[in-house]
Image (cartoon, helix red, strand yellow):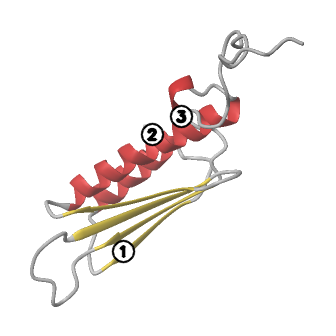
Amino acid sequence: MRTKPSFPIRIRTQNVQLTDDLKQSIESEAAALKRFNSRIVDCEVTIAGPGRNHRGGLAFDVVVKVALPGPDVVVHRSAAASIPVAINQSFATARRRVKRQAHLRRRRVPFNRTSGVGRRGRPRRGNGRRLARA
């Protein structure tokens, strides 16, 4: 049995018709994001198909916007194969980014991915230059 998420999920389409199975899979993927960050406020999924004169290239665009306190997570993916492939790719990226936001909020950031935080452990003794004694 599916559980209802505690935040609204909006699905918008443009030049494409979604089946009920695709809508349910989008809702379940969006609800699963709550497992990685419990502070999600809103989720909006926009799926755009090819226009009337589109002859080749990347056909389906999927944009997932997850509203969080602080910076929002926005994922934009394009796929030529099919709509489910584009949806799976975009939600996989959204999961990683939502998880990363939760780690940043808790300050559990892996050291190799921090920027401007500084060294861990003991500081070095001096900077390699000797001081002249008077």
Instruction: Identify the mark at residue 35; answer none if there is no mark.
Output: 3
Which is nearer the N-term, disc 2 or disc 1? 1
Q: Quadrant of the C terminus?
A: top right
Q: Is 66 on the left or on the right of 126, as rendered?
A: left
Tag 1–tag 3 contact (CB < 8 Å): no
State the CA–CA distance, disc 3 to disc 2.
Answer: 12 Å
Q: What residue is at 80 percent from the left and 15 percent from the top?
A: 132
Q: Position of residue 31 (x, y in %)?
A: 49, 45
State the CA–CA distance, disc 2 to disc 1.
Answer: 24 Å
Q: Position of residue 76 (x, y in %)?
A: 39, 61
Which is nearer the N-term, disc 3 or disc 2? 3
- Count neighbours of disc 3 (C-alpha within 10 A) and say few if under 14, some if 14 to 19, many if 20 or more: few
Q: Position of residue 131 (x, y in %)?
A: 78, 16
Q: Label 3, secondary structure: give it.
A: helix
Location of mark 2 (residue): 96
Location of mark 1 (residue): 13
Q: What residue is at 30 percent from the left and 68 percent from the top?
A: 61
Identify which residue, 54 or 122, lies in the foreground.
122
State the CA–CA distance, disc 1 to disc 3.
Answer: 26 Å
Outermost left residue: 55
Q: Label 1, secondary structure: give it.
A: strand
Outermost front residue: 134
Q: Amino acid at mark 3?
A: Arg
Quadrant of the rendered structure where residue 14 is?
bottom left
Total number of numbered discs in the rendering: 3
Q: Position of residue 102 (x, y in %)?
A: 61, 36
